[in-house]
Amino acid sequence: LLGAANTPISSLTTNAKKVHSFCDGWRHEHAISHFTEVITNKYNTDKQPVAIVDFCCGYGLATLNLRENLIKNGVTIAKIVGYDISDDMIEFAQSKSTLFSEVEFHKKNVETEFDDVAQYDVVLCLFGLHW
């Protein structure tokens, strides 16, 4: 589920069944902890700013928790963008992220619109695939 931006989106979704069972029993904190560790191990070594996208971000709480954990671990974030199809969820996420200039939330149908994925170093779908 976590892939480099140059990984074809099809390869991220072909293992959806495997990802579903991997995420099903996980609580929110475990998933955030796991992805924090993976991203920190990959991007904290060269100190280059990392660009992250979170598809199906919902209310953005997992995205914001991930941001906080990465910063605590010394990862420099160029930007972290969350996409969701729900106006209400994006509005809530935007209201919680106003203090963070590197964080953006936008309405987007990621089933059909993912043309900008190449600009990101890390592509996540923390919880969207199992719905």
Image (tube, helix red, strand yellow):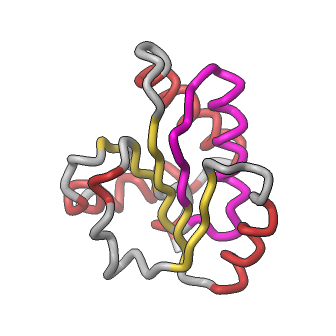
For image coordinates 47% across by 18% down, the residue present is 47
Q: Residue at x 64, y 42 (%)?
A: 66
Name which residue lies at 80% across and 61% down. Answer: 96
Residue 88 against residue 103 in the figure, above or below: below
Residue 24 percent across, percent down from the top left = 56, 56
Pick the residue in front: 21 or 11. 11
Q: Quadrant of residue 11?
A: bottom left
Q: Position of residue 3 (x, y in %)?
A: 33, 44
Relative horizontal placement of residue 127, taking residue 66 as reference (left or right)? left
Residue 27 within the segment the image draws in magenta: no
- Residue segment shown in magenta: 57-81
Whether the magenta-drawn stretch holds residue 77 is answered as: yes
Nearest the viewer among 11 and 114 is: 114
The quarter of the displayed image where residue 15 is located: bottom left
As displayed, is residue 2 above or below residue 130? Answer: above
Residue 106 to residue 63: above or below = below
Q: Residue furthest top?
A: 45
Image spot of residue 87 (x, y percent): 65, 86
| Residue at 62% across, 20% down | 74
Q: Position of residue 106 (x, y in %)?
A: 56, 73
